[in-house]
Amino acid sequence: MNNFSPISERIIKYKVLEDKKEIKLSNSSISSVSGKKIKDTDEIPQVEKVGLEIGKQIMQARLDKKIKQSDLAKQLNVTSDFIRDYENGLAPLNKIILNNIAKKLGIKILY
């Protein structure tokens, strides 16, 4: 016999490592231990992006050094698409990654 209940009755539990709160996910809503409900229709928080200004700094430094996106990507062990997203300001802001890019290009990125 199957011990699983129908999907509509199942509740999946997750541990959130960042704030160490347990949340329960169901088909229609998320409810935290504190009891606050977040509906499926609630807005998802936006992730801060690198932005065009920083992207232009990276691109200009790369072009000044006559380095291709693919070559910079190989040096950083990432894909060319990854570098493109940073240069276009579309990548999530990550100061560690930005510092690695800055080191490879010999620049200081102001953010």
Image (cartoon, grey):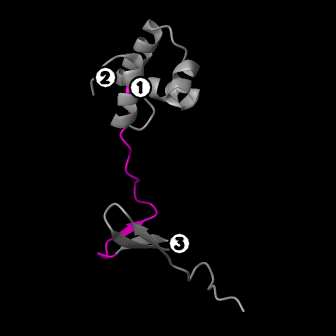
Mark 1 highlights which residue?
101
Mark 2 highlights which residue?
109
> What amino acid type should be assigned to the residue bearing mark 2?
Ile
Q: Residue at x 63, y 85 (%)?
A: 4
3 in magenta: no
Q: Are marks 3 and 2 in contact (CB under 8 Å)?
A: no
Mark 2 or mark 1, whichever is nearer to me: 1
> What amino acid type should be assigned to the residue bearing mark 1?
Ile
Distance between the Cα atoms at labels 3 and 2? 44 Å
Instruction: Say whether residue 6 is visible.
Output: yes
Mark 3 or mark 2, whichever is nearer to me: 2
> What amino acid type should be assigned to the residue bearing mark 3?
Asn
Mark 3 crowdedness (10 Å alpha carbons): few <14, some 14-19, many ≥20: few
Residue at the far right in the pictured view: 1
Q: Residue at x 38, y 46 (%)?
A: 46
**What secondary structure is found at the residue carrying circle 1?**
helix
Considering only vertical position in the picture, is 28 above or below 76?
below
Horizontal arrangement in the rendering, residue 72 relative to residue 39 (left or right) = right
Q: Are marks 2 and 1 in contact (CB under 8 Å)?
A: yes
Q: Nearer the viewer, residue 53 or 68?
A: 68
Mark 3 highlights which residue?
27
Q: Earlier in the sequence, mark 2 or mark 1?
A: 1
**What secondary structure is found at the residue carrying circle 3?**
loop
Considering only vertical position in the picture, is 68 above or below 51?
above
The residue segment tinted magenta is: 33-51
Distance between the Cα atoms at labels 3 and 1? 42 Å
Residue 47 image point, x, y percent: 38, 44
Q: Main secondary structure of the magenta part?
A: loop
